[in-house]
């Protein structure tokens, strides 16, 4: 139950503190006084999106806090206990707070502890529900239709169990799919590495072989040319240099002179002839080592071509292939296909799916069991709202989600002979508003929702119908706290507490808890406009008297 709302610097509100009690509380006031602003502030503290525009002009930040009594709410207490957020001094109460700074960023708190906005919204969701002026538009959404049916006849625990089971199943399934993709990629990489290593091994490259092959290939390619050159040198030495050198030696020895220079010249020429003979002999020895092997050359070319083809494929130099093979073998050794994890995860997915299907089937049975009485109660409520011709039926559609095994479509027939159709196609705006109100009241009467906030849910109704709406809300308030913003005096008169919202000349919104006399004046204003007469006051007293009977 909502016990208190404190607002600081929110839009037109400078400072406002409101206390709430059980039963039915109404907020009234002239149009534009700020009634919906109060609900906007409450929505913000419950987790709605914030912007810096909500901060009152001239203020640096706004702050909204709401206090709830959770004395009889075991689910809320358990949730806080799990997150270690319970107030140790007062576990039966909970204070939620939202602060919005000038840059638009906000911070949420539960019992003074900062929390994520998702945690705040998840905690507050089962504590209070707000239905705004255009809430009936949500009735066109299938998830909303399903949620209201669940509010009517399904235990919150089984809904939470199904949602949690679905989440575990989908999370495990996503992890399994990711692991399968990784294993597939790993297997493909492993296959490639094994192929590449096999290719290098089949090449049978030995250490230093590339350098040796290159040297041998160059010698074989150059052998013909070298032997031709050596042959020419040998011929030149034999036919020209040696004969001339010999003739020079003979000529010098015929000179009869013992001069030292001549003697030295004779010795040098004689030595040159000897060295030419030795050089000729060495060249012949070298020439004999030069084998012209056409087949050997072809084999070398084939071997080198194979080596260079592989090196190009691996994008390394030929003399780096051995190193490349070692790198590939090291990478292959580091790859591990986690088949055991795959098997375990597959079992987890199957188990989570089994659990989800089990609980979702229970949820589905509960929904279908309560669908008929839900339809009956809604139609009965529509009769009291002067829509006797409208009939509601529920059409279930198979669809797995965190909400279970199906969605539901509300079908209506506004005239008895006509077949039922979808709400968006059949119902008018006014009919939607009343149908939405009827469903909300029927669902809330059976649900465990502690607090229901209605923002002009009675819009478009008046007279006897407004009185019926008020009595419906009054009955609902016997077990659910109801806070209703209304323009209907018939509804306001039936409330346990009456608050009046006003706007000052400074455009500040304020709120006042009305006394009995104040309620008479406010009801008179609602009945007769700005001018309050004795007649309107008498009528207001009559409304209040009838409400207390």
Image (cartoon, helix red, strand yellow):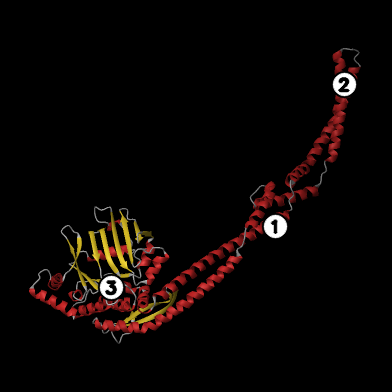
Name the residue that disc number 2 marks: 248
For mark 2, give the secondary structure: helix
**Do we see residue 235 in this rendering?**
yes
Name the residue that disc number 1 marks: 198
Q: Is residue 190 left or right of residue 47?
A: right
> Which quarter of the rendering shows the C terminus?
bottom left
Q: Nearer the viewer, residue 203 or 496?
A: 496
Residue extending furthest toward the front: 89
Mark 1 and mark 2 lie on one chain; the one further toward the N terminus is 1
Q: Is 335 rendered above or below residue 125?
A: above
Name the residue that disc number 3 marks: 481
Q: Is residue 377 left or right of residue 273?
A: left
The picture places residue 494, in percent across and down from the top left corner, at 20, 76
Mark 3 and mark 1 lie on one chain; the one further toward the N terminus is 1
Q: Nearer the viewer, residue 352 or 519?
A: 519
Q: What residue lies at 54% left-to-right and 70% top-to-bottom?
A: 348
Q: Is the residue marked by circle 1 packed among few (<14), some (14-19), or many (20+) residues within 10 Å?
A: few
């Amino acid at each position: 139950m909502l016990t208190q709302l404190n607002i600081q610097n929110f839009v037109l509100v400078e400072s406002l503190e409101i206390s709430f009690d059980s039963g039915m509380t109404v907020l009234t006031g002239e149009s534009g006084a700020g009634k919906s602003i109060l609900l906007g502030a409450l929505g913000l503290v419950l987790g709605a999106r914030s912007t810096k525009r909500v901060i009152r002009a001239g203020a640096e930040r706004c702050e909204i806090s709401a206090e709830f009594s959770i004395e009889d709410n075991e689910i809320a207490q358990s949730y806080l206990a799990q997150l270690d957020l319970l107030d140790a001094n007062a576990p039966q109460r909970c204070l939620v707070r939202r602060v919005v700074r000038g840059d638009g960023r906000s911070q949420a708190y539960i019992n003074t502890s900062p929390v994520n906005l998702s945690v705040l919204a998840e905690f507050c969701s089962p504590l209070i529900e707000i239905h705004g002026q255009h809430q009936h538009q949500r009735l066109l959404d299938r998830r909303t239709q399903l949620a209201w049916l669940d509010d009517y006849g399904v235990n919150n625990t089984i809904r939470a169990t199904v949602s949690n089971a679905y989440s575990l199943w989908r999370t495990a399934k996503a992890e399994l799919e990711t692991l399968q993709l990784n294993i597939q990629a790993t297997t493909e990489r492993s296959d490639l590495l094994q192929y590449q290593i096999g290719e290098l091994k089949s090449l049978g490259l030995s250490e230093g072989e590339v350098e040796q092959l290159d040297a041998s290939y160059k010698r074989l390619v150059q052998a013909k040319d070298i032997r031709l050159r050596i042959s020419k040198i040998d011929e030149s030495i034999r036919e020209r240099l040696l004969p001339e050198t010999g003739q020079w030696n003979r000529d010098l020895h015929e000179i009869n002179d013992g001069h030292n220079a001549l003697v030295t010249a004779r010795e040098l020429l004689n030595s040159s002839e000897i060295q030419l003979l030795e050089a000729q002999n060495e060249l012949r020895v070298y020439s004999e080592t030069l084998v012209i092997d056409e087949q050997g050359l072809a084999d070398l070319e084939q071997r080198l071509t194979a080596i260079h083809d592989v090196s190009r494929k691996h994008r390394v130099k030929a003399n780096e292939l051995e190193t490349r093979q070692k790198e590939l073998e090291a990478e292959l050794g580091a790859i591990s296909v986690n088949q055991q994890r795959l098997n375990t995860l597959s079992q987890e997915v199957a188990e989570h799916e089994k659990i989800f299907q089990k609980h979702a089937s229970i949820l589905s049975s509960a929904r279908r069991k309560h669908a008929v009485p839900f339809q009956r109660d809604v139609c009965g409520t529509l009769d009291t709202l002067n829509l006797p011709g409208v009939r509601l039926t529920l059409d279930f559609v198979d669809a797995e989600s965190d909400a279970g095994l199906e969605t539901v479509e509300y079908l209506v027939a506004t005239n008895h002979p006509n077949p039922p159709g979808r709400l968006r196609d059949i119902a008018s705006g006014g009919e939607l508003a009343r149908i939405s109100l009827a469903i909300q009241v029927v669902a809330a009467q059976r649900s465990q929702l502690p607090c229901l906030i209605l923002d002009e849910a009675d819009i478009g109704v008046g007279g006897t119908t407004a009185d019926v709406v008020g009595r419906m809300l009054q009955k609902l308030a016997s077990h659910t706290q109801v806070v209703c913003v209304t323009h209907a005096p018939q509804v306001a008169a039936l409330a346990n507490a009456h608050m009046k919202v006003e706007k000052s000349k400074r455009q500040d919104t304020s709120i006042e808890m009305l006394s009995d006399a104040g309620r008479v004046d406010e009801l008179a204003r609602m009945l007769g406009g700005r001018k309050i007469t004795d007649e309107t006051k008498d009528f207001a007293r009559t409304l209040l008297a009838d409400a207390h009977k």
